[in-house]
Every structure is written in C-alpha cells, then in structure tokens.
Image (spheres, helix red, strand yellow):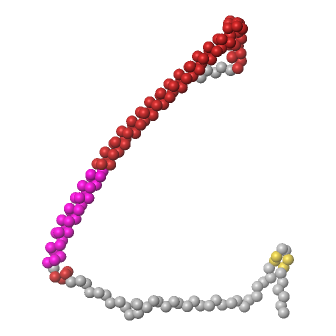
Amino acid sequence: MFDVGFSELVVIGLIALIVLGPKRLPEAARTVGRWAGKLRRFVSEVKQDLDREMHDAELTELRKLKQELDQTRQVMQETSSGIAQSFAETTSAAASAIQPNLSGNPATDSSPPALASPPGADKPAARAKRPKAVKSTRKSRSTKKHGRAKRHERT
C-alpha cells in the first residue's frame, strides 16, 4: 500500500530519536507496534467478513438457480409425459382404425407362402484353392556391400 523503503525508515527513526529522546523511544516503538498489530488484525477480520458475505451471497444465488432448474426439469417432465400420452392415444386410435379393415379382408388373413430354399443351401460353400507360388530360377545379381562387389561362386 505505502512504498516505504529502508532509507525512509532510517530517516523516520532518526527524527523520532531526536524528538522523543533515547529514554522514550523504545516505549513509543512498542506502542506503535501494538497499534500496527491491532490495525492488521482489524483489516484481516474485515476481509474475512467480506469474504463470508460474498460466499453467502454466492450460495444464495446458487440455491435460487437450483430451484429454477428443478422447476424447469419438472415442467419438461410434465410436457414430455403429456406428449408421450398423446402419442400413445394417437397410436392406439390409429391401430384401432386399421384393425377392422384388416380383419374384414380374407385375402390378408392368410399368411404368405414360404419361399423354398435353393438346393445345396444347407451345405457350406467349398473353399477355393489357391495357386501355388512359382519359384524363380533366376540367380540374383551380385550386390555391393561396403564398397565391394559380392560374387557368387558357381560350382
């Protein structure tokens, strides 16, 4: 907060020594130290109180948000259940409208004929044979290895 360097403290100490004298200076320093300690404690308590109040305000705001979210969730559930119920009613009404039409038609009452499976469908397919690899009869050329040509000896 205040920028007081070492040189400023020395000047203040010399002025206090001249004004108060060597007998009263230690007593004055103790009194100033006590007041400084009280001031620091007071400032830290005020900071803690402000932090607590801000924390409490944040908590109340979060509680309000939670209540709003709960209300929104409840409205969404009611709406979705209403939609599901109306869909079920519509589906059952459509099914009941279609059912009399199906039961009155004898052509649709019979099941479709079963398709015959082709002959040999029960057997697994035979595996195709691969052609065998043909070995090359060519001899390899000599290759260079470390600057030298490698020669193949013929016998």
Image x and y of residue 114, in percent: 29, 87
Say which quadrant the N terminus sits in.
top right
Q: Give, as a single range, the part of the protein colored magenta.
A: 76-104
The residue depicted at 40 percent of the width and 90 percent of the height is: 121
Front-most of 21 and 125? 21
- Residue 6 lies in quadrant: top right
Residue 135 magenta:
no
- Residue 23 lies in quadrant: top right
The answer to whether 16 is drawn above or below residue 127 in the figure is: above
The residue depicted at 20 percent of the width and 62 percent of the height is: 89
Front-most of 61 and 142? 61
Most frequent secondary structure within the magenta stretch: helix
Residue 20 is at least partly visible in this image: yes
The answer to whether 116 is drawn above or below residue 105 in the figure is: below
Image x and y of residue 5, in percent: 68, 20
Relative placement, left or right, of 62 versus 35 is left
Residue 85 magenta:
yes
Image x and y of residue 33, in percent: 62, 17
The answer to whether 116 is drawn above or below residue 93 in the figure is: below
Say which quadrant the C terminus sits in.
bottom right
Image x and y of residue 146, in percent: 83, 74
